[in-house]
Amino acid sequence: MNRDCISADVIAMLRDLGTATIYEAQGAKGALDSGIKPIDPSMRLAGLAFTVDTRPADNLMLHYALLKAKRGDVLVVDAKAFMEAGPWGDVMTQQALQIGLAGLVINGAVRDAASIVEMGFPVFCRGLSIKSTGKNQRGEVNVPVCIGDVQINPGDIIVGDRDGLVVVRREEVEVAIRNSLARIEKEKLFREKIQNGVMTTELLGLDETLRSFNLI
Amino acid sequence: MNRDCISADVIAMLRDLGTATIYEAQGAKGALDSGIKPIDPSMRLAGLAFTVDTRPADNLMLHYALLKAKRGDVLVVDAKAFMEAGPWGDVMTQQALQIGLAGLVINGAVRDAASIVEMGFPVFCRGLSIKSTGKNQRGEVNVPVCIGDVQINPGDIIVGDRDGLVVVRREEVEVAIRNSLARIEKEKLFREKIQNGVMTTELLGLDETLRSFNLI
Amino acid sequence: MNRDCISADVIAMLRDLGTATIYEAQGAKGALDSGIKPIDPSMRLAGLAFTVDTRPADNLMLHYALLKAKRGDVLVVDAKAFMEAGPWGDVMTQQALQIGLAGLVINGAVRDAASIVEMGFPVFCRGLSIKSTGKNQRGEVNVPVCIGDVQINPGDIIVGDRDGLVVVRREEVEVAIRNSLARIEKEKLFREKIQNGVMTTELLGLDETLRSFNLI
Amino acid sequence: MNRDCISADVIAMLRDLGTATIYEAQGAKGALDSGIKPIDPSMRLAGLAFTVDTRPADNLMLHYALLKAKRGDVLVVDAKAFMEAGPWGDVMTQQALQIGLAGLVINGAVRDAASIVEMGFPVFCRGLSIKSTGKNQRGEVNVPVCIGDVQINPGDIIVGDRDGLVVVRREEVEVAIRNSLARIEKEKLFREKIQNGVMTTELLGLDETLRSFNLI
Amino acid sequence: MNRDCISADVIAMLRDLGTATIYEAQGAKGALDSGIKPIDPSMRLAGLAFTVDTRPADNLMLHYALLKAKRGDVLVVDAKAFMEAGPWGDVMTQQALQIGLAGLVINGAVRDAASIVEMGFPVFCRGLSIKSTGKNQRGEVNVPVCIGDVQINPGDIIVGDRDGLVVVRREEVEVAIRNSLARIEKEKLFREKIQNGVMTTELLGLDETLRSFNLI
Amino acid sequence: MNRDCISADVIAMLRDLGTATIYEAQGAKGALDSGIKPIDPSMRLAGLAFTVDTRPADNLMLHYALLKAKRGDVLVVDAKAFMEAGPWGDVMTQQALQIGLAGLVINGAVRDAASIVEMGFPVFCRGLSIKSTGKNQRGEVNVPVCIGDVQINPGDIIVGDRDGLVVVRREEVEVAIRNSLARIEKEKLFREKIQNGVMTTELLGLDETLRSFNLI
């Protein structure tokens, strides 16, 4: 897989695999904290991270990002977890859909949630606020940002679903997918065995540990 | 517009305009904090604030408010953000519907959420708690209350939707509506232009600012 | 009612009575804190508590509990309110359904929320996290645990719905049900009277208190 | 007492009376929330509020306030409770001392705490942050601000000590002081009686209430 | 050791042993959550728990407890973690000192912190608030209370220092002390060995575990 | 300056410069969040980061780190912000002093605070907990860790004081120091000018901005 070219199929596959599977498949890393969630539980998201570092309560850099981001990108915005401003709303959502962006991840809040859900644009955030933002402060785009104790680099793949968000490094996409598929296969087998009466302690080989604690 | 007589049509119009629009239209003020939300995302609310100042975990004054409030009023209750009591439930909701109240905003929690949603009464709160309340402590009604860093006066109009809550002073209703309608018109135009390929940076006149930062 | 034998009918009745009613009926006690909620608002739960005391971010003891719990039990897990790990997911849910467990209450987070909701297994928790757990630390099962300032003993009945969770001591089940039914009857009467124009202040006999404050 | 002229003696008296006494003396009102505290427990503060409404992470308006505030004023800044920026530091403290300001109350964080303590300037805030602020966003001075569910008007007197902060309306200063002195006298008497073996239940006349609960 | 008679020497010994040592010595149990701390870091506390279950923002039951508690008791008050009221202050502190109480632990806030520190009465709480309380709501004394996920029974011994609080069951006092002394002896030996160049991994026998992870 | 050899003098200089100055001097970056603070306000810290990634409530990797870290290192531990365990105490502090470590930064809690302060070892953490940790889970040392939205790499320099913590990349030490010294010089000049009556608005060149807002 060429690092510079992640195909739409690969992105779609990551979106379908789901965050918990990918997280485990790539070695239990890359998960954002539990406080950022989709504004509608049915939303799923995958795409290349177009990162934005902005001050709280100012969305100049988000408008700038809309000027620079490309079809399939996910805006990943560090708005400093400030909850009392909504730097993203329905007009920006329409612009994002026009460009073909794949979604928004914001360390902060948004507004116009009802419209955004109706427009079908995946937004992951910490909450909703109608409070206003300025449009006059400098920030940066396409720099590494740290959100929820995970560093996200421009061009990383970010995947989201009801459970949360996970970041996949470009160079690890192939192995993440391969391991995810293997994990899904293994879990499918687990399910069949469970239906046949096998216990998870046996499936996961926990008997020895339990015995060492005199539990079985 | 007569200060003493806000018509049902005006209230309905405010409810339909939505909180984010009204907030901006009246000069970016009057928004409650992001922690108070409807118990069902589809709920919308508008009405005259009937304010209640009560101690945490005591609902005597809410029953008193039900005795005094009028058709179309919204009870706006400062229960001190205490989360471990639910001073409002389904019986009170039925009383409120009987009176014709327009909804409840409470700085605290409620219970019987499933019933309340079914009964179709708009309730905005910080969470749900089944824990009990006393009915023996004095409080006040129809006094200014401060919730989420906003002062709400008796007779102010309070509007709520999925995004949150905004307060409109009686004497500013007319200008809030006028500006909201203008804003909606402008945003409609923005949407059309976006569909025709214009970027938000151009629509909002951000180019100069971006140039001053050497971003474009 | 025999303490050792709570019938399925009794459990079902408790589930239908709802948490707020039971909480009040048993003397305003047994409610867990407001931070633990069902992952889907329509979920209801009732069953005998099979308690699990585990370290944060380790699910060895949850697998062990799946080995030991019986049909109709609810796993009540103290995972120390740690939000950045999901010690329960879809494979364990399938195992739980296979055994016939009645649900999960966890002082912490879970993952695979979408699948769990689809599988119809009631889960009450503080949030969702995809982050991983170890499977190597000792804990205890069937010991009293304290969650949200309530002690839950093995064999207590735990009941949950959209409003939250309440614990019923085995020896108090009968009185809890009896009082709940009486309370429902009383509230039904209240509703009828409210429809006939009686106010809650009169129904609840609050007039004297209000008069003592010179409010009426 | 002339509303336009609160003497330095009156201010000093309020500072010495302490927040808890004044709060009770003026009818249990005017207390800010428990999250704003002095950066050193020994700090005490009293003065006329010079209010500042600013965006998070921008201190242009604080510099402007330093230009406009007068000797004896306390800057009361609503920085929107944003914790990840320190809009006030040692240079501004020196300016404030030069002007003769009586202190700073900020709904947010500050930096250079060690120097500020050493310089002896009373600062009340929510925490400490070294993170930077812009100096380019408009705000307002001498407008009412709501912090911690209390409205503070320009010219109100604000008093702080280890326990927290309380606001006294100008027109209520006289009565607040008179009642505070009476309260101190009464508490002194209480202390003497306690030393002579009288219990607080008797001093406060709680026996009847306790008897009504069959507690005594 | 007679369960009904814990000598003052035993209490003093527990106070000196310190919370972390006792907690470990009795099998890693009994610790309250990390949010309750002494109002002055030098405060230490030990005594028999006189428990109080009260509503938030009402201190009638605290005055009642002062009537009933005995020399050497520690009031352990569940005020429901409500932070915006201070149900304990300097007058009550004087009463407590008069009676000879050993301290206060409150799941909530207090006021008059400066005076209390000066009077030398150990108080452990979640914060400081000057806001007022009623004196008219029923509660209970000498019942088990759950604070910070630990149940505290009347007559349990509660010990506090800068690190926090730990509860010792009466019937486990002897073993807690014996194990604490052994632990202190062992740690003293550890310290000597560390000074002689032995590493903690060797002292604690962690080499095998580290080797199993290929770390050494 | 050789990247592989940061002299003790350079470290000492960084410690003396202070966090706020360094943060600004290196371009307003590298500050950890406001929730991690020294356990005693007088503590200062500077040294090379020896990073540790550990599970919550397990300190095996901290003991391992003590085996591997070198004189002058600061242990920088990501314990996942879990507050209900104290993976560091007085015995480990003694080991750290024996080795000559420069301090501890932990994304979590510690215990034995009184002893640690007495021993004079700088510890920066989120709080204090006496609760126990296991010693049996794998983690990693000398890998990049993200704490409070900042990535810290092994060998970065970490500096702490009462205001908080800041990270300096090795390759940026020289410029950070140079700019810090210049900044201190500039602020010294500011102070002199302030004493001579110059206002901060003039010193910082804010007049134009204020004029653009019609404020002056």
Image (cartoon, coloured by chain):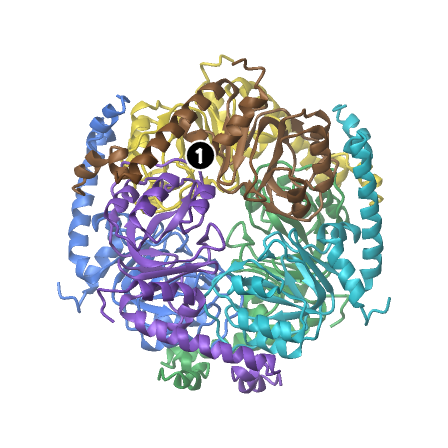
Chain colours: A cyan, B purple, C brown, D blue, E yellow, F green
Percent of width and height locating residue F132: 63, 36
x, y percent for residue E128: 38, 46
Towards the viewer: A45 or B151? A45
Q: Quadrant of the C terminus of chain D?
A: top left
Numbered disc 1: what chain? C
Q: Is residue C185 above or below residue A182?
A: above
Relative to B110, is A149 on the left or the right?
right
Vertical position of residue F118 compared to residue D56: above or below = above
Up the image or down, D60 lies above or below E197; here it is below
> Is disc 1 surrounded by few (<14), some (14 to 19) or many (20+) residues within 10 Å?
many
Residue at the far right: name it: A1
Q: Residue at x 56, y 86 (%)?
A: B207
Q: How many marks?
A: 1
Identify the secondary structure beneath mark 1. helix
Q: Which residue is mark 1?
A: C20
Dividing the picture into quadrants, the one containing residue F86 is top right
Name which residue lies at 74% across and 24% down: A215
* Image x and y of residue D19, in percent: 29, 51
- What percent of the width, then of the height, locates residue A92? 57, 73
